[in-house]
Amino acid sequence: MFDALKVKNACVQWIRDFFEENGPGCNAVLGISGGKDSSIAAALCVEALGADRVIGVLMPCGEQHDIDMAHLLCDHLGIKRYVVNIKDAFDGVINNLPKDMPITEQTRTNISPRIRMTTLYAVSQSNNGRVVNTCNLSEDWVGYSTRYGDSVGDFSPMSNLTVTEVKEIGRLLGLPSVLVDKVPIDGLCGKTDEENLGFTYAELDRYIREGVIDDPAKKELIDRKHKANLFKLQLMPSFKPEI
């Protein structure tokens, strides 16, 4: 019984309130990948603030096969964009790591999103901005984000909404279906999200909202991922001395 219009309107007002309290007149700055999350987050910010206060940052690492989708989104919303290719930065980190240190595939995969977040903050600070976190509840639930990469930002309009709910809002915002319904690919290893996860977002979203899942093996996998990645959603532990 998700009321997409009610939630969309409340989220738009929440964004306006955030900026009133944390930077009147500031701009919303976000990475634009061409996928549904960055597209819908950008559209929410445009409705809340106006297109003149939303800045998209396209950050290919060398060649990006679907970067045309990112340009399509910026053209559709009429927002300013910057294109910053992070390939030199990525290569600089990789090439300067100790030669005798093994570089795991996970290490290599997560360098790009961390460089992208550094880039976003550089653009944001130079444009009187606030960085938009574009994560959703479904991805956060199973830790499908990079710590200190796409998991951070200054405000998060969609982190309590599932993929299914986010897509409903995207349709209400009038985004092209090619963006809302684009098969999500992580942009890091070339696989779809669902190939990486081992279950569909529809299965995950139903489990999150209703506690129902038909496949016991997938339930066990979701529970294991959720427990293992809870640390990503919590503040960094800090020692409190008794003084």
Image (cartoon, grey):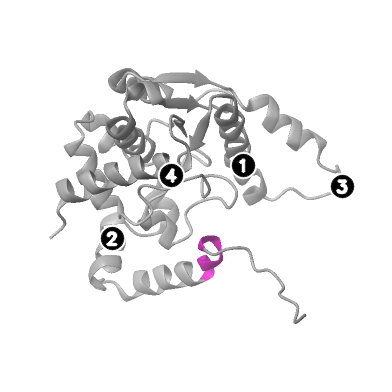
Q: Position of residue 206 (x, y in %)?
A: 24, 64
Which amino acid type is shown beneath numbered disc 4? Glu
The residue wearing badge 1 is 114
Which amino acid type is shown beneath numbered disc 2? Asp
Magenta stretch secondary structure, dominant: helix
Which amino acid type is shown beneath numbered disc 1? Arg
Q: Would you place residue 90 above or below residue 220 in this image?
A: above
Which amino acid type is shown beneath numbered disc 3? Asp
Going from N to C along the chain, the mark reached first, 3 or 2, is 3
Going from N to C along the chain, the mark reached first, 3 or 4, is 4
Image-based side of 29 in relation to 169, left or right: right
Going from N to C along the chain, the mark reached first, 2 or 4, is 4
- Looking at the rendered image, the quarter that the C terminus falls into is bottom right
The residue wearing badge 4 is 21
Element at label 1: helix
The residue wearing badge 3 is 100
Which span of residues is magenta-colored? Answer: 228-233
Task: Report if the CB atoms under discs 1 and 2 are less than 8 Å apart.
Answer: no
Which numbered circle lies on residue 205? 2
Q: Determine the CA span between mark 3 and mark 1.
A: 23 Å
